[in-house]
Structure formats: structure tokens, C-alpha cells
Amino acid sequence: MVIRSNVKKYALISVFDKSKLKFLCENLNKQNIGFISTGSTFKKIRSLGFDCKEVSKLINFKEILEGRVKTLHPKIHASLLFKRNVKSHISSFKKLKFPQINYVIVNLYPFKNTLKKTSNYNKIIEMIDVGGTAMLRSAAKNFVSVTAVYSPKDYNQLINNLNKNGGNTSLKFRKKMAAKIYEHTSKYDNLIANWLSKKNTKNKERKINLKYGENPNQSSYFIAKNNNTIFDCKISGKKLGYNNILDVNEGLCCLGEFKEPTCIIIKHNNPCGVASSTDIKKSFINAYNSDTMSSFGGIVLFNRKIKKDLAIILQKKFFEIIVAPNFEKSSLSILRSRSKLILIESKKLQSQQSNEFKSVNSGVLYQTHNNTKINKKSMNLVSKKIPSKSIIEDLIFAFKVAKHVKSNAIVLAKNKQTLGIGAGQMNRLDATKIALMKLNKSFPAKKFVCASDAFFPFTDSIKLLKKNNCDAIIQPNGSINDLKIISYANKNNISLFFSKNRVFKH
């Protein structure tokens, strides 16, 4: 047993990880630093052959409540917190007749590892460290005089600093360790808070690994926040992929704009065909006919139940995913004949989101989701020509779709059916040309309305639209050429509406 009678400085040691305890004690002992400890750490230090003062004897208070209360005592925290250069502090501390603690080496209970090993509530609760965090925080607060270390990875730094400074540590080192203490205890507390909140709400976060990300060389996974995810609602078909999830999410957001029976077909995160009617089967036929080529291999979403007659039609075409609130039993047996076809019941899936996050270089972008409502109140007639009720309804329909098309976006529609969609172009004129190309391929000489996700900066696009029988246009205002656009619409007998909101989508 190594016993020293001239010890003036003490290290309070309480460690869960005892793998480096011998190394620590040997080197602290060389600096004539005495040891104070409790519980299993006290026994281990003694078994290693070092003298050690037991906390319970120093404070004259035995451990209670099965070890829950060991170091939560005024004498201990006074030794950690008293200011070494303030006479009143020194005087008050001397009256306690307690050793001066200048070093605190404490490992916290392994709460995170316990969560991985067990779901037993009582076992997890007992791994919430109270006394350890209290000692570390007290010592870190008084870093001007006290050195606090929580990780065995920092033991070498501690010993090297002591050797370099003749048995003391530098203020720079103590401050550095104090910062690490507060960062560590903050994360520790946050982990506990997250576990408790999930425990109370019965929500358990799940990590679901995906085959790959947007491309095969990219790894990916899905973090499930509750039990109503796309994975929980999948009832048939192959495994969901990263791109599948993005497409279904976008489709649901777009579908949430409509109350009447509506079908939306999504391809590469853009609507390629959308239609509303009084009958969901008719809505599908119209949406599919909007762009039959792009619809091939797409994701089809409905806001009404799929019945047998519709299932027969769907089964004959190639789609990756079909989403609907529910399916009739007879329709399921038909659709499941395609073993890889993914079927999702969407009644528990949210159609609207509240927040959006995107990782960018050196940070994360945040914005509220664009939940703006599109209706008659959100648009103003700025031209002389007054449109019919059906044209206004088509404009509202088209602008709802444009809200979910990548910018620059142009949507052409008639009778609540998209006739041509120009998506993701770097200029509005090209988006218009693409939309018209699709219109003229499938619906030549048909009159239509146009929705633009942002203002037309020039009349070039509107001239093309008029040439191809456009009756009415809806667009946000804000261009320096707004008056020229209005003037052109009036001269060419076009109904022009300005929407109150822009609907860019990047």
C-alpha cells in the first residue's frame, strides 16, 4: 500500500471505465496527488495498492438509496467550487475540515450503451448519472483552480500537462477540459431527454437502411419518426428505394391540394399527368392520357378507394407504385398479380408537411413548407376579359399543379386535366415550349388555360400561348413588365389573373 502523509492536493476519482485506472493512479501518485473516491472505484484503487480516502467517511454520511446518493454533499461541492483567491471563501471552506480537491476525474454512467443493450425501463433509469454530472459541472465552473476530466482518452493529456507544469495544470488546459465537460454533459442530458420524450409518447425512432441513395454509389437510410411511415403503410410489392420515397412524398403533397376525385402520376419528382373529375376511374384515364410516354414506370396516386374496375385497368399498365387511401379486396388480388408492384395505403400518411431542411455546404437550410392555399381568394383578375366559371376552375387546378412542378414550371390544362407540363427549365420560354410540345402532340387545336409558377418577364411566352389557343393565364406579379403583360393580354383577348403567391420549387 502506497501511503503519503504530506499530500496537499487531492483528485476525486469516480470512474465507470476502470481500464486505465492503474495508469492514472500511478502517474498522479508521482505528482504527490492524493485520492478520494467512492463505491467500486474506491475498492479498485485500494486493490491496486494505493491509499485512498473514502467519501462516506470524509463527509460522515454513508451511501443511501442503493447508491443513488453518494457524492451529492455540500462539503464535496464546496471543495470544488470555493474560490482559492477569496478570503471569505477560504475561511468558510477551512471550517468544513475537508480535503481540497483540485482534480476531478469522473466517467458518467454509460446511458447511450445501455439504450443499445436493453429496453428495460428500470435498468435504463438507473443509468442516468446525477452525482457524476454534478461533480463535473461544479469542477468545470471553477476551472480557474480545478481540473476536470471525463474521458479516459484525455488521461494522457492530463499527465503530460502535469509533468510539463511541475505537478500543476495550465489554465489553458483546464479551460479546454471545462469546455469539453459542458459539451459532454449537454449531449448526455439531451440523450436522456430524447429518450424520455419518446418513452412518454410511445414513439421510437427507427433507422431503416435503403438499398442505395439517388444513385447506386450513394448510401442511404430512412429515419422513421413514428409508426405511420411509408414503410408501415406498404401492403405489397418490392422494397422501397430512396427515389420511390421522394416521389411518393411529392405526390402526396400535390394530392393534398385537391378534394374532388383526383389522380396524380409522378415521374422523377414531377407531376407528368394530373386530372380531377367526379369519378376516380375517369380521373386516372385523363391523368394517364395527359402524357402516356412519361407515365410509363411512374408512381400513381389516388385520393379515393381503388375498386375492381379501376384495378383491372391499372394492372394492364406498367407502374412502380400505386398509392390510394385503401383498396377493395378484389382489387388487391388483381394488382398483386404483379409481384413487384408496390401498393401503399395512404390513409395514415400525412399529405402536408410543416418544415423543410436541406444540407448545403457548411450548414443546413431551413424553411417552412409551402402550405399556401390556392383558391379564388388567392387570385385577382387584372385583364378586361372576364372568364367563365369553368375557366376559373381550370386556372385554380393548373396553378395547384404548378406549385408542385420544378421551376421554371408551366402547366397547361382544360376541364381539370393537364394537357402539357414544362418542368425544370432554366428559362420560362423553354418551359412554355415544352408544355406546348406535349399539348400539340396529344391535344392539337384544343383550347386551354396556362399556369406559371412565377411571372412572365416578357411577352414572348404569352405570344406562343395565344398562337396555340390559350384562353386564360394565371401567374404571380412582380415583374417590371407587369403592365406590358396586362396590356398584351387585353389586346389579345386573354383573361389574365395575378396570384397572390409565387410557387417556386427547387
Image: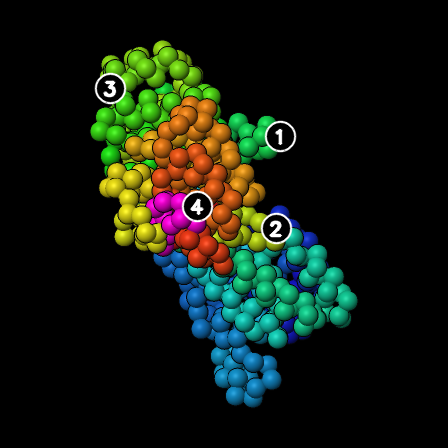
* First reached walking from the N terminus: tag 1 or tag 3: 1
Q: Is residue 382 above or below residue 388?
A: below
Q: How many marks?
A: 4
Q: Amino acid at mark 4?
A: Asp
> How far apart are the two marked residues, 1 and 2, measured between alpha carbons?
20 Å
Contact between labelled residues 3 and 4, with CB atoms less than 8 Å apart: no
Contact between labelled residues 1 and 4, with CB atoms less than 8 Å apart: no
User: x, y percentage for residue 453?
Assistant: 44, 46
Choose mark 4 or mark 2, whichever is in front: 4
Q: Please tell me whether mark 2 sits on a helix, a strand or a loop.
A: loop
Contact between labelled residues 2 and 3, with CB atoms less than 8 Å apart: no
Q: Amino acid at mark 1?
A: Asn
* First reached walking from the N terminus: tag 4 or tag 1: 1
- Residue bearing mark 1: 217
The magenta stretch is 488-500
- Residue bearing mark 4: 453
Q: Is residue 431 magenta?
A: no
* First reached walking from the N terminus: tag 3 or tag 2: 3
Give the colouring mode of the picture. rainbow
Of the pair 297 and 183, the residue shown nearer to us = 297
Q: Amino acid at mark 3?
A: Lys
Residue name at image x 53 percent, y 27 percent: 211
> How far apart are the two marked residues, 3 and 2, measured between alpha carbons?
48 Å
- Residue bearing mark 3: 307
- For the question of whether residue 339 can be seen, the reply is yes
